[in-house]
Image (cartoon, rainbow, N blue to C red):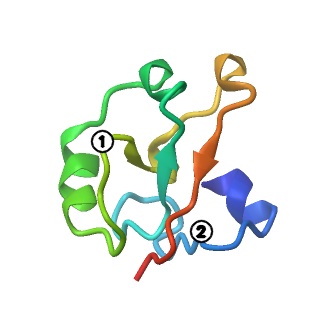
């Protein structure tokens, strides 16, 4: 989420600044990468219930994805709407 905001990625609003409170940084993880991420924790799961775009099996909040060297090349797609 922070990298998306710094690079003005369209569609990543991040209204709460990465505090996992608003779900305006919802993304879809490419299926090939979904097994490489940490599991969705309870708070993130609850926020994903109320996202503006369709929730998918690969939906995540980008503020909860901790970037590491292992995720170099990670493919994310931004939904059509966040609010």
Question: Split into 4 quadrants, where in the image is the N terminus?
Answer: bottom right
9 versus 55 height, above or below: below
Q: Nearer the viewer, mark 2 or mark 1?
A: 1
Mark 1 crowdedness (10 Å alpha carbons): few <14, some 14-19, many ≥20: few
Q: Nearer the viewer, residue 51 or 47?
A: 51
Q: Secondary structure at mark 1?
A: loop
Q: Position of residue 52 (x, y in %)?
A: 33, 75
* 2 or 1: tag closer to the N-terminus: 2
The residue at 58%/53% (across/down) is 77
The residue at 74%/29% (across/down) is 73
Residue 57 numbered tag = 1
Mark 2 to mark 1: distance in Å? 19 Å
Q: Secondary structure at mark 2?
A: loop
30 versus 59 height, above or below: above
75 versus 61 height, above or below: above
18 versus 53 height, above or below: above
45 vs 63, left or right, is left
Q: Position of residue 19 (x, y in %)?
A: 42, 59
The residue at 25%/60% (across/down) is 47
13 vs 60, left or right, is right
Question: Split into 4 quadrants, where in the image is the C terminus?
Answer: bottom left
Q: How many marks?
A: 2
Q: Position of residue 22 (x, y in %)?
A: 36, 71
Mark 2 crowdedness (10 Å alpha carbons): few <14, some 14-19, many ≥20: many
Indicate the quadrant where residue 72 lies: top right
Residue 70 numbered tag = none
Q: Position of residue 63 (x, y in %)?
A: 50, 51
Residue 12 numbered tag = 2
């Amino acid at each position: 989420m922070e990298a998306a905001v710094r690079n003005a990625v369209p569609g990543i609003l991040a209204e709460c600044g990465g505090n996992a409170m608003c779900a305006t940084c919802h993304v879809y993880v490419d299926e090939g990468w979904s097994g490489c991420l940490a599991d969705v924790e309870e708070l993130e799961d609850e926020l994903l219930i109320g996202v503006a775009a369709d929730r998918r099996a690969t939906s995540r909040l980008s503020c909860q994805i901790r970037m590491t060297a292992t995720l170099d090349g990670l493919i994310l797609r931004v939904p059509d709407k966040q609010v």
